[in-house]
Amino acid sequence: MTTHCLKVALRTTIPVFLGYISCGIAFGLITINAGYPWWLAPATGILIFAGAGQFLAVPLFAAGTPIPVILVTELLLNIRHIVYGLPLINQFKECRRFKPYLIYALTDETFSLLTTTAVPPDIPAEDYYFAVSILDQSYWVGGSLIGALVGAMIPFDMTGVDFALTALFAVLSIDQIQKFVKERKDREPEEVEHAGN
């Protein structure tokens, strides 16, 4: 991966950076508030990396929920990723080196970026997909680490913090809908012109 590719991916992922840092901090704080050690928050971001699933897992484990119930609940929550994967089958078809990681690192926000941004012509598609995915994950892990360390040092009132990821998803969804509507309106004059010919 070149420096140019990394710079382009950094610009592309700025909205996710802003959301994941804040949501990651919230997750770190919630993890500490539930009585778990600070290192567990970034470790789950590295090993699991399923934001909503991580938020859900903390109270389930804290309540002593049986493991089979947690597994089924997490499966139901994250089953949407199967649907997310379908539009990316063609995009990932030529990926060789990073394909397993790209599948693993697919989150709502990463899916949104990979399906709505064009790969620059001077950058190999696989490198671009990998850069976007690894940056998004690093934002989440970094935010989780910050939240966990701060939560271990300073007590916080956690009321409402667990809603942060839902709010992020809503904001990104609204942004994608607005982009879709704008692109559709921009295409309408062209479609009318072609229909007239």
Image: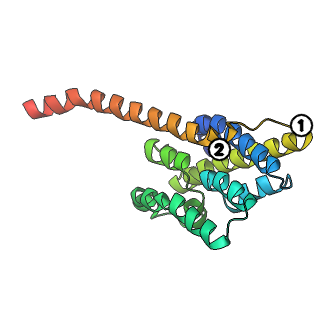
Q: Secondary structure at mark 1?
A: loop
Q: CA distance from mark 2 to mark 1?
A: 35 Å
- Residue 4: quarter of image: top right
Q: Amino acid at mark 1?
A: Ile
Residue found at the far bottom of this picture: 68
Identify whether 142 is placed above or below 77: above
Residue found at the far left of this picture: 197
The image's colouring method is rainbow
Q: 196 and 5: which one is in front?
A: 196
Q: Secondary structure at mark 2?
A: helix
Q: Please tell me which residue is depicted at 47% across the width and 64% down the height of the picture.
A: 94
For disc 2, the marked residue is 6
Question: Relative to 108, is 55 on the left or the right?
Answer: right
For disc 1, the marked residue is 154
Q: Amino acid at mark 2?
A: Leu
Q: Please tell me which residue is depicted at 50% across the width and 50% down the height of the picture.
A: 111
From the image, which quarter does the C terminus lie in? top left
- Residue 90: quarter of image: bottom left
Residue neighbourhood size for the residue with mark 1, other residues' Cα within 10 Å, grouped as few (<14), some (14–19), many (≥20): few
